[in-house]
Image (cartoon, rainbow, N blue to C red):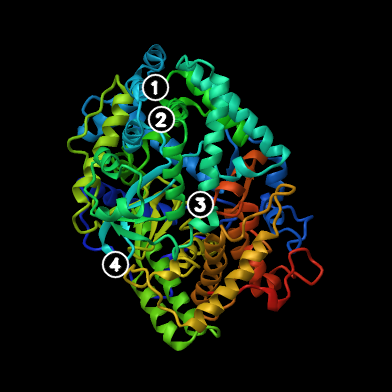
Amino acid sequence: MKKSLIALSITSVLLTACGESKQTPVAETKIEKSEQSITQVTEQKAELGSFGVDLSARNEAIKPGDDFFMYASGTWYDNYEMPADKTRFGAFTALAERSERQVKEIIDDVTSRTDLNADEKMIADFYQSYMDTENINKLGLLPIQVTLDEIATASTVKDITKIFGASWLNGTTSPIGGSMWFNRLDADKYEMSIGAGGLGMPDRSYYLEDNERFTKIRAAYVAHIAEMLAFAQVENAEQKAQAILALETKIAEGHWPREKRRNRDITLNQIKRTDLAITYPNFDWETYFSETGYQVPQINISQPEPIKAMIALLNNEDINVWKDYLTYHTIKNNASFLSEDVFATNFKFYGTELRGQKEAKPRWKRAVSQMSGTQSLGFAIGKVYVARYFPESSKQQMAELVENLRKALGERITNLEWMGEETKVNAHEKLAAFNPKIGYPDVWQSFDGLTISATDLMGNLKNLRKFFREDSISKELKKTDRNRWGMTPQRVNAYYNSSFNEIVFPAAILQPPFFDPNADPAVNYGGIGAVIGHEMGHGFDDQGSKSDAKGVQRNWWTDQDREAFDAKADELAAQYSQYEPIPGNFVNGRNSLGENIGDVGGLAMAYHAYKLSLNGKEAPVIDGVTGDQRFFLAWAQVWKEKRTEKSMLSQLKGGTHAPGRFRAQAPRNHDAWYKAFDVKEGDKLYLAPEKRVRIW
C-alpha cells in the first residue's frame, strides 16, 4: 500500500518532549534532503512483499498453533545457510548489515577526499590506523608493553589495586569495577555504581556447572589462556593457566546469579565515599579512585556481598596469580588491536569455541564496529549517517506512532481489572511523562580536544578512553545531561532509561522490517509499533515499575496491586522457563522477565493502537492475509533468526533476552492471535484463556 502512517494517525498530538532543536548545519542539510524524499517514498512500494511481510519465508505446512516461529519464517530458516563469519543471522542482523554498509560508504567517501573537517579527519585517520595491518603486525605486543611491565613489577596488593583502578585506560580487567550513572533517588545527579566483575567467560555458570559440556569448555579455556600467555613469553604457561581458572572460579562463586543482579531492590545501596573503608574494609579505595580520576562523593554498591568476596580474594590469593591473571586479560582484551596472530588465537576461543563462529569478520567490519560505539567516533559518524540515510518524514511518522501507543496504553491502564485506582493515577502520570527520543540527538557530541593519529591504533584507543573519561569527570558534580544518548543513530536497537523515563529509538531501526512508510499499517504496528510498546513496557516491567514518573526509585504501588502484578509476572517467568532450546538448557524466565513483559505487553499495546487506527472499520484482506494475521506475522518475522548452538548457549547463560524463536511465540498470550490463526486446544502453543498472561 502507498499510504503513509501520517494519514492513518489516531491522534493529532505530535512529539514535543525532546525540546528545542539544536541541530548542526549537517542536520539542516538532512532536512532539505528529506523534503525531497517524502515524495519519493510515497511513490515506492513496500520493501518486503506486496504489503511489508515476506510471505515466501513462511512454512505453511506447520500449524501456527504448533510453532508460530517456524510457520512465519520456517522456509527461510530451513534454507538459510549461516555464513562462516556469523554465529547468528536474522532480521536484526540483516538491518545491522545495511547500517554497516552505509557507515562503510561514509568512511570510504571521507577517506577519498582531502577537504575534510575536523571530525571527518578523525574518522579517516582512525580507520587508516585500524586497517594498517603491516604496521600492527610489526609491533606485536609493543602497544601494551608498558602495562605488561607494570604488572610484572607489581609486588604488593596496593600495586594490584592501582592496576585495577586504571583498567579503564589499559583495557585490562578488574574484579571490582565502577562507572558513572544516574542517582536512582535523584535523576538530576550522577553517582558511581560499583559491582563485581572480572570473569573471562560469559557467565558464572561456565565455571560452576558440572557437566560434560562445560567441562570441555573449561579445558579449552585453560589451553587458550596458556597460548595467550606464551605471546608474553610467560614461563610455565599451562600451570599458570590452571591457576587463573581456579582464581576465576572463586570469583564466579562470589558473584550473584544474573537474575539476582537485576533486582533493583537489593542493588540500591548508596554510601558516602568517606564511609567506604568502614563498610568495605581491607581495600585501598583511595588508590583505586585516584586512578579513575573521579571525585565521587557518593557511591552505589550494587552488589554488597560480591564486593566483599572480591576484596577477600584480593587479600588472600597469591599475588603472583593475580599478576598472571592481569597479564592474560590485558593481552586478551586488547587482542583485536594487536598483531593478527594474537587476534587469531583469541578468536579461536572466543569466536569459535564459545560462539561457533568459523571465521572472523573481515577487518573493515571490525573497524566499523569499533568506530561506531558511543565511546568512540560513533556520533561523528552518526551525524553524517542521519544526513544521508534518515528522512525527516520517518521521524515525524515515528512520533505519531509513539503517541498512538501512548494513547493505547493509557486506555489499557484505565481498564485494568487487577489494578486499583490509586495505583492507576501514578501509572498514568508515569505514562504521560514518557520522553521519546527519535532518530538522533538534539545536541551532538563534541570531539574538541581529541587527537587521532593515522599511524597509532593503540594510541588512538587510549586517547578516546581518556577523552570520554575526562568528559565524564567534568560532568560528575553537575546536573545530569538529559540530552545524552546511550546509542548512536546507526545502531539497530532501542532502549528505555528509567532514570530519565525516556524511550529511545535510533535512526537505523526505523527501516524494514520494523518500519516501512509504504507498508500496510498492520505491519508497522506489528513491527515498530510493538517495539515502541516493548520499550514503554520496560517502564512498567518487574524492575522499571520500581521508578516513578520522575525516574526516582520508589514504591508508587499499593501493596495489593504490587502483589497482583508479581503474581502475573511469576506466571510469565514460569511460562518462558519451560522453553528448552538446547537439551538440558532452558530459557531463564526470571532473568529474561523484564524483556518478556516488554514483549507481551508491547504486543498488546500495539494491537490496541492498530485497532484504534482502523476507526471501527474492517481491515482489508491482502493476498489472502487478514489485518490481524499481517500484524502477528510482522511481529514474528521481526524475531526471525538462525544461530549456532554455542551462540544459543551463550545467550541462555549470559543474556537477558529469550532467543528470537521464543520471542516470536509471545502472541500465544493474546486472544486475537487464536482467532486470527484458528489456534485450538491440542495445538502445542495453546494456552487456556485463564493461562494467558495479560499484564498491560
- Of marks 2 and 3, which one's residue comes earlier in the chain? 2
Mark 1 touching mark 2, by CB under 8 A?
yes
Per the image, label 2 sits on a secondary structure element best described as helix
Between marks 1 and 3 in the image, the one whose residue lies nearer the viewer: 1
Sequence-wise, the earlier of marks 1 and 4 is 4
> Callout 1: few (<14), some (14-19), or many (20+) C-alpha neighbours within 10 Å?
some
Dot 4 alpha-carbon crowd within 10 angstroms: few under 14, some 14 to 19, many 20 or more: few
Which residue is at 56% across, 54% downward? Answer: 657
Report, in whole angstroms, how far the alpha carbon at label 3 lies from the one at label 4: 26 Å
Q: Secondary structure at mark 3?
A: loop
37 horizontally vs 63: left or right = left
Amino acid under label 1?
Met
Q: Note whether residue 54 is visible.
A: no
- Residue 17 is labelled as 4
Which comes sooner in the sequence, label 3 or label 4? 4
Residue 367, numbered circle: 2
